[in-house]
Image: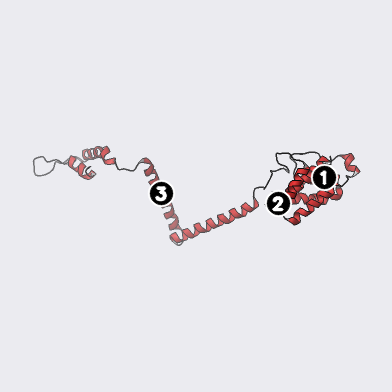
């Protein structure tokens, strides 16, 4: 069993000289002897390792920080906890608010179409399937894509893979001025459900479906044909 540090050091520094009292050692020599003795590994076998000492230092600093904050806060610890609770609640409320405003688009990216090209008929069929399942957000998106691709297939729009719904509606409105306002409304509906985080509705989908049908039977203005769709 390892003797207590103080006992071992005292035993090594005091010896019986054969007289009535212990030998007196100069202060500096005694300090040096004590330091050498305490440097013996036997006395450090149960010391915390480097990681434990670092953690102890860290938590002590954290405790000191909270103690200082509590001392500077009206009401002490109770006041500090109340402030922390208010901050946490505000952070949660802000996160919920920003989450609703910055919701990730449900499909696609910044453009109207995704990477895999499909025909207008394929988008139209997808829109009808979504509508039958009351998935109105997807139905609105697919119907708008069908409308744009139909106009491209009829050469009333120049093909543009990176085109946005607004750009398509503006360009198509020049070729089909009688439908310009409805095209702009369709583009707004597409943007609202895709980028605005709003869910589509049957009431929103129905006008797009009707517009799609009407556009397939519409004729462009002569000026638009001569002037180009750009």
- Asked where in the image residue 221 lies, by quadrant, the reply is top right
For the view shown, which residue lies furthest in the left direction?
A: 19
Who's the residue at 88% across and 41% down the image? Answer: 225
Looking at the rendered structure, which numbered label has been put on residue 137? 2
Relative placement, left or right, of 63 versus 200 is left
Q: Residues within 10 Å of mark 2 (few under 14, many from 20)?
A: many
Q: Earlier in the sequence, mark 1 or mark 2?
A: 2
For the view shown, which residue lies furthest in the right direction?
A: 222
**Nearer to us: label 2 or label 3:** 2
Rendering coords of residue 162 (x, y %):
73, 40
Q: Earlier in the sequence, mark 3 or mark 1?
A: 3
Q: Residues within 10 Å of mark 1 (few under 14, many from 20)?
A: many
Which residue is denoted by mark 3 in the rendering? 59
**Dots 2 and 3: beta carbons under 8 Å?**
no
Whole-number angstrom distance, CA of label 3 to CA of label 1: 66 Å
> Does any portion of residue 58 appear in the rendered image?
yes
């Amino acid at each position: 069993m390892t003797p207590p540090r103080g006992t071992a050091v005292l035993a090594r520094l005091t010896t019986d000289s054969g007289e009535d009292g212990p030998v007196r050692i100069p202060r500096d020599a005694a300090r040096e002897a004590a330091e050498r003795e305490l440097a013996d590994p036997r006395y450090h076998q149960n010391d915390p390792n480097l990681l434990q000492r670092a953690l102890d230092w860290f938590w002590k600093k954290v405790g000191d920080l909270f103690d200082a904050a509590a001392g500077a806060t009206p009401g002490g610890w109770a006041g500090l906890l109340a402030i922390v609770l208010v901050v946490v609640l505000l952070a949660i409320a802000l996160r919920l608010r920003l989450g609703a405003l910055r919701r990730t688009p449900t499909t696609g990216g910044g453009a109207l179409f995704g990477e895999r090209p499909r025909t207008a008929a394929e988008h139209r069929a997808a829109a009808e399937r979504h509508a039958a399942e009351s998935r109105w957000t997807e139905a609105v998106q697919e119907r708008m894509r069908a409308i744009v691709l139909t106009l491209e297939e009829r050469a009333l729009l120049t093909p543009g893979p990176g085109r946005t719904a607004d750009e398509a509606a503006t360009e198509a409105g020049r070729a089909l001025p009688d439908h310009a306002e409805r095209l702009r409304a369709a583009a707004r509906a597409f943007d609202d459900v895709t980028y605005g985080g709003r869910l589509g509705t049957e009431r929103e989908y129905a006008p797009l479906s009707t517009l799609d049908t009407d556009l397939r039977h519409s004729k462009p203005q002569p000026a638009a044909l001569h002037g180009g769709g750009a």
